[in-house]
């Protein structure tokens, strides 16, 4: 049942090319338009949307953080992302033209369920992004986009996360199509890029052994930091969460620009810092990330850099270089998170922990 893998988690990491491909299947009409079949909201209802609030917990929350970058960029609709457990306790501003997007792999997370109930009482429309057919959250929502990861057994979310990202990108592009904020060929170009992701993922997975070796070098680490910027920031947070929940290690993710505002004080000789380097582009992101890496390295950190193939600027500052496929910055989380999943899975295995059933955790959290 684990297809020869030691853990469900590892099996599920390796299923990701298939899971992403399945989540992209059948999304184009013969006219080349994007379609979201199971979406029960009309285009008119979507056009009325003037604000989006994404609510979720844990890894699903990080998918929501990535979604904010994509939705705002492609649609110009303002997006807030909020932890479901905080949402209804702060008297959020919700109207009939607010679209609440609830992201939940299980569809049973109590915090998220209570949050959508609150939103519906305020007459907002709720769209669920969910992996579990017929679960409570999609049943209580106005609309749903199902992800097609297949059952996720490992407590740590992996393929669930990747397929949530795909659903978020599709939602963003669909809104752009409906609102006319992007031209059809721009949308087609991104969908084509998404279609090439399964192949890129396979490449990353083919390199798993080198990430495993790296992970095993860190069995004695007491703390690990993760840095990212832009869409790489939620990836850093997700990398840290994986390490906490599986290896029981102190791990923290930071937006690289925040380093000098406090976290850099944590850096000491030999501290592993995993850095998600944005693709080289016309903006300043890449250069700024590079200077963050230099700063931590100058203070003794061991820099483990995830950077795209062909990026040679990074080599002088990387103690270890993990190569990523070349994809646009908004899509980079899809490929950048995979080495971090492999790293956490292998490190936890080396420490002798039960990767599929980490201590104190449950697969779906059905109490608030
Ligand atoms: O089923 P959900 O997506 O609603 O679950 C949300 C979180 O409980 C979940 O992502 C959790 O953080 C995972 N253990 C992370 O690996």
Image: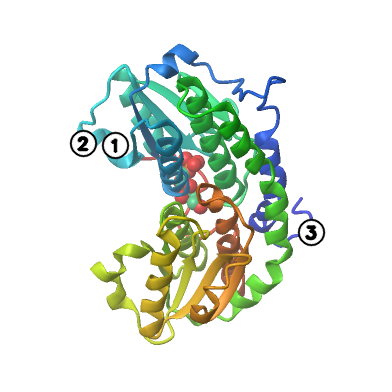
Instruction: Find out whether the residues at labels 2 and 1 contact each other: C-beta distance under 8 Å.
Output: yes
Q: Which residue is mark 2?
A: 90
Q: Separation of disc 3 and disc 2 at Cα?
A: 47 Å
Q: Which residue is mark 1?
A: 87
Q: Residue furthest front?
A: 282
Q: Which mark is residue 358?
A: none
Asked if residue 69 is positioned above or below residue 214 in the image, the reply reads: above
Q: Secondary structure at mark 2?
A: helix
Q: Would residue 46 appear left or right of 219 to someone viewing this image?
A: left
Q: Which residue is mark 3?
A: 4
Q: Secondary structure at mark 1?
A: helix
| Colour basis | rainbow
Q: Quadrant of residue 265?
A: bottom left
Residue 157 seen in the figure: no
Mark 2 within 8 Å of ligand 1, using the beta carbon: no
Within-10-Å neighbours for mark 1: few <14, some 14–19, many 20+ = many
Q: Quadrant of residue 295?
A: bottom left
Asked if residue 233 is positioned above or below residue 128 in the image, the reply reads: below
Q: Residue at x 24, y 67 (%)?
A: 261
Within-10-Å neighbours for mark 2: few <14, some 14–19, many 20+ = few
Residue 240, x across and y down, in percent: 45, 63
Q: Earlier in the sequence, mark 3 or mark 1?
A: 3
Camera-side residue of 184 and 89: 184
Q: Residue furthest right?
A: 4
Mark 3 within 8 Å of ligand 1, using the beta carbon: no
Q: Separation of disc 3 and disc 1 at Cα?
A: 42 Å
Q: Residue at x 59, y 41 (%)?
A: 163
Asked if residue 32 is positioned above or below residue 191 in the image, the reply reads: above
Q: Separation of disc 2 and disc 1 at Cα?
A: 6 Å
Q: Quadrant of residue 30?
A: top right
């Amino acid at each position: 049942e684990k297809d020869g893998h030691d853990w469900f988690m590892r099996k599920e990491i390796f299923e990701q090319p298939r899971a992403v491909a399945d989540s992209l299947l059948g999304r184009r009409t013969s006219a080349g338009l994007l379609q979201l079949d199971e979406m029960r909201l009309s285009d008119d209802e979507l056009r009325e949307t003037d604000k989006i609030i994404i609510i979720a917990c844990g890894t699903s929350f990080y998918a929501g953080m990535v979604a904010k970058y994509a939705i705002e960029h492609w649609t110009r609709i303002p997006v807030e992302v909020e932890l479901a457990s905080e949402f209804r306790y702060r008297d959020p501003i919700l109207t009939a033209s607010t679209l609440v997007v609830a992201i939940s792999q299980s569809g049973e997370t109590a915090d998220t369920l209570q949050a959508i109930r609150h939103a519906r009482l305020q007459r907002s429309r709720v769209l669920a992004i969910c992996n579990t057919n017929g679960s409570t959250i999609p049943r209580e929502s106005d609309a749903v986009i199902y992800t097609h990861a297949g059952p996720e057994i490992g407590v740590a979310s992996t393929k669930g996360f990747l397929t949530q990202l795909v659903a978020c990108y599709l939602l963003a592009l669909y809104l752009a199509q409906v609102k006319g904020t992007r031209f059809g060929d721009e949308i087609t170009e991104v969908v084509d890029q998404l279609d090439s992701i399964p192949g890129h993922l396979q490449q990353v997975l083919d390199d798993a052994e080198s990430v495993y070796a790296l992970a095993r070098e860190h069995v004695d680490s007491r703390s690990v930091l993760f840095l990212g910027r832009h869409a790489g920031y939620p990836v850093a947070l997700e990398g840290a969460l994986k390490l906490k929940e599986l290896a029981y290690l102190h791990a923290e993710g930071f937006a690289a620009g925040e380093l000098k505002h406090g976290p850099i004080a944590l850096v000491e000789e030999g501290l592993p810092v995993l850095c998600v380097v944005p693709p080289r582009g016309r903006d300043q992101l890449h250069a700024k990330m590079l200077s963050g890496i230099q700063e931590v390295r100058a203070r003794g950190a061991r820099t483990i850099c995830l950077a795209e193939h062909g990026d040679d600027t990074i080599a002088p500052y990387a103690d270890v270089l993990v190569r990523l496929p070349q994809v646009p910055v908004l899509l980079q989380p899809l490929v950048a998170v995979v080495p971090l999943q492999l790293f956490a899975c292998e490190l936890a295995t080396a420490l002798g922990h039960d990767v599929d059933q980490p201590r104190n955790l449950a697969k779906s959290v059905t109490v608030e």
